[in-house]
Structures are given as structure tokens and as C-alpha cells.
Image: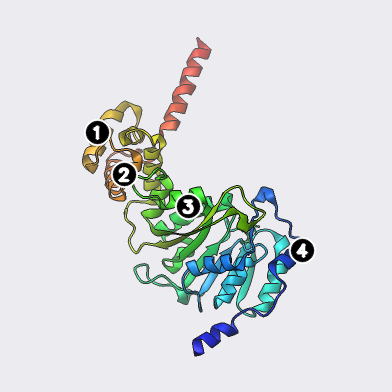
């Protein structure tokens, strides 16, 4: 009873609707910046519920825009909300919201791609990595050209326990275009299995929450949108460095319809390619004729361990890039033909 009264007292007082605010501050969505606003409060509430119980939580919302999702986060009873918004046109409307939620909302006018989230929350929130996740959540409905590079950066942060993950296994609830949602959550053998599936799933439990039809946004985007929840795993499923895993997976998936040994071969200099590929496949004990989409995370782990072993024996192998070798070869050929 006491708790529900406390949550009720944290609900926002009557405010102009988000639609009215958009009109008041003339917040035309910038189509070229993919600003698609979510104004249906039932959907923003549902998105916030996907993040879990936020009563008393610390939250960072990325790209609040006109503040529809922000209202749902505040109404969920959060103790502290930091919003990070790049576009200054939204600041007056966000200020109005923060005044309606005294001492609970902070506004950062910044680009989330360069903003440092560490140290923006109390150090007491931190939990040892293997413990329960800290009471800190990141939530956002960002433009798709920002959300995909951002999740790749945050996956690297998870691997290295840096950035927002200095607090422990901070959970993320983010929107992506439907096609990216499918790739993030694809299981072994499915058509959408890709680099992104492996990179996300070896580090996190990745859960597809629900799809939002395009017409729920103003203006309507060309694609449907999905909500994905990420919880970093207490122990990553692959123990090698993020850079090594990223390089391996990038090479494996470059020929996604060919046997996996084709892409793996490109990890090695041309002069030693066949024998080193065979050595790596034998050490990993992975069938070279599996398709990349049929590789499980334990397969990738075995390949990463075998590749790390070979890199330790061959200085310079980890920094080898076949495209660079190809570029130098073409340059030499051109020089030779120009001089003859
Ligand atoms: N969250 C709001 C909603 O659901 O209605 C707005 C969504 S709109 C798709 C994306 C928002 O992210 C815009 O307000 C935009 O200005 C902001 N944004 C875009 N890139 C950003 C960045 N790099 N850092 C911070 N905010 C950004």
C-alpha cells in the first residue's frame, strides 16, 4: 500500500500532451535525421515495461526528443533520469518535463556517440560483474543510423567492462528497425544469422520484446520497428578479446553462402593460407564445410581459441588484413606495368 502510494506520488502532474508540445515549440521532425516520434503513451508505457521494474531505478534515456517515452519512464517511478539529447530544439520541452518531476530529471545536451556515461551516476550503484545487474538502465528510441553503431560500441564496452558497464551489467532496452532486430536475435541456422547475432549473443542475453508498427510513429518510417532488451552475461561465452572475435566473425561472414573455411582462410597471408586454414580448423575441431549461418557460439569460441593460439605463435598475424595485402599487390602490379 505504502509503495503504491509512493509510485502514485511520483506520477507526473497534468501537462500539455506531447502533441501539443510539438505544436507549441514547432518541433517539426527532421526527416533527414530520421526523427520519428512515438506519441502513443500505451506503446511508450509498454516499451518501458520491457525494461523491467523501474521503481526507484536510475535511468539514462538516449534521444528523448519531444519526451513521450520520457514521460512513461518518469511515470514508472524512477528515482533519477538522465536524458541525453543532441538537438537543441527539444531542450525547452524537456525542461518543462524536468520541472514537473522535481529532482528526478537531468538534461544533457550532448551527442550520445561521444558523451561519457561513466561517472554520471552515483558510484554506490556499482555491482560486481557476476552479481545481479545494477539498478541502472539505458532506454532509447534512437534514429537507426545511430542505434546500430551505438550497440556495436556498447557491446565492445560490455566485453571490456567500460563506459556504462563500469557500473556492472547495465541493462539496455532499445529500438531498432525490424531487420536489425531479426539479426540481433537470430538463432543458429536461421536466414538472418549474421555477424551482429554472434557479437550480441556471445556477450548478452538478447530478448526481442515486441514489434511496433510503422504507423505508430510520426512521421511514419519506411520500416517497422522492434524493441530489444539486452542483459550482459555474467560470463561472456567467448573469452578472447572483442577485437579478435570481431575480426574472426567479420571474416567468417564475408562469404555467408560459402563453406566457413573460405572466410576463415582470409585470416591468413596468401603464401600460407591453405596449411594455416587447415591447422586452425583442426585445432578448433570445426567442420570446414559448415555454412557461417550454421556455426553455433561454441563453434565460434573454438575457432577464436584456435586463432588466438596461432596469433600467439605468429607475431603480426592478428594485425594481418587480407584487403591490405591485396591493395599492396595491386599497387605493385600497377607500378610494374607503368614502368614497363
Ligand atoms: N525518443 C523520442 C520518441 O520516441 O519520440 C524521439 C525519437 S527520434 C527517432 C530520435 C531522437 O534522438 C531525436 O530526438 C534526435 O534528436 C535524437 N538523437 C539523434 N542522434 C542523437 C545522438 N547522437 N545523441 C543524442 N540524441 C540523438
Distance, label 3 to label 1, CA atoms, is 35 Å
Distance, label 4 to label 1, CA atoms, is 64 Å
Indicate which label's residue lies in the foreground, 1 or 2. 2
Distance, label 2 to label 3, CA atoms, is 19 Å
**Which residue corresponds to mark 3?**
181
**Left or right of 280 in this view: 105:** right
Indicate which label's residue lies in the foreground, 2 or 3. 3
Residue 16 vertical placement versus 280 (above, below): below
**Which residue corresponds to mark 1?**
278
- The answer to whether residue 117 shows anywhere in this view is no
Q: What element carries label 1?
A: helix
Label whose residue precedes the other's in the sequence (2 or 3): 3
Label whose residue precedes the other's in the sequence (4 or 1): 4
**Which residue corresponds to mark 2?**
295
Residue 8 vertical placement versus 131 (above, below): below
For the view shown, which residue lies furthest in the bottom direction? Answer: 2
Q: Do the residues labelled 2 and 3 touch (CB within 8 Å)?
A: no
**Crowding near the residue tagged with mark 4, few <14, some 14–19, many ≥20 C-alpha atoms within 10 Å:** few
Amino acid at each position: 500500500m505504502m509503495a503504491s502510494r509512493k509510485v502514485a506520488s511520483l506520477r507526473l502532474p497534468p501537462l500539455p500532451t506531447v502533441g501539443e508540445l510539438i505544436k507549441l515549440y514547432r518541433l517539426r521532425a527532421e526527416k533527414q535525421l530520421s526523427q520519428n516520434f512515438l506519441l502513443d503513451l500505451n506503446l511508450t508505457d509498454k516499451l518501458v515495461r520491457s525494461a523491467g521494474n523501474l521503481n526507484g531505478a536510475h535511468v539514462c534515456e538516449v534521444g528523448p526528443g519531444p519526451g513521450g517515452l520520457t514521460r512513461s519512464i518518469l511515470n514508472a517511478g524512477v528515482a533519477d533520469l538522465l536524458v541525453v539529447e543532441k538537438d537543441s530544439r527539444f531542450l525547452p520541452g524537456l525542461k518543462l518535463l524536468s520541472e514537473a518531476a522535481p529532482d528526478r530529471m537531468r538534461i544533457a545536451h550532448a551527442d550520445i556517440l561521444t558523451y561519457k556515461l561513466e561517472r554520471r551516476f552515483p558510484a554506490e550503484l556499482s555491482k560486481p560483474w557476476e552479481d545481479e545487474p545494477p539498478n541502472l538502465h539505458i532506454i532509447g528510441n534512437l534514429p537507426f543510423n545511430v542505434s546500430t553503431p551505438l550497440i556495436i560500441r556498447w557491446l565492445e564496452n560490455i566485453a571490456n567492462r567500460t563506459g556504462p558497464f563500469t557500473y556492472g551489467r547495465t541493462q539496455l532496452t532499445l529500438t531498432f528497425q525490424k531487420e536489425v532486430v531479426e539479426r540481433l536475435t537470430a538463432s543458429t541456422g536461421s536466414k538472418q544469422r549474421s555477424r551482429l547475432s554472434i557479437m550480441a549473443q556471445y556477450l548478452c542475453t538478447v530478448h526481442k520484446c515486441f514489434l511496433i508498427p510503422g504507423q505508430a510513429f510520426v512521421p511514419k518510417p519506411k520500416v517497422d520497428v522492434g524493441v530489444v532488451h539486452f542483459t550482459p552475461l555474467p560470463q561472456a561465452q567467448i573469452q578472447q578479446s572483442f577485437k579478435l572475435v570481431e575480426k574472426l566473425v567479420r571474416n567468417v561472414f564475408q562469404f555467408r553462402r560459402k563453406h566457413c573455411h573460405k572466410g576463415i582462410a582470409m585470416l591468413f597471408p596468401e603464401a600460407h593460407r591453405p596449411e594455416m586454414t587447415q591447422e586452425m580448423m583442426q585445432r578448433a575441431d570445426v567442420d570446414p564445410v559448415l555454412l557461417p549461418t550454421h556455426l553455433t557460439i561454441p563453434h565460434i569460441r573454438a575457432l577464436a581459441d584456435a586463432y588466438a593460439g596461432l596469433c600467439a605463435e605468429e607475431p603480426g598475424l592478428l594485425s594481418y588484413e587480407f584487403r591490405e595485402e591485396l591493395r599492396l599487390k595491386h599497387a605493385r602490379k600497377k607500378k610494374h606495368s607503368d614502368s614497363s
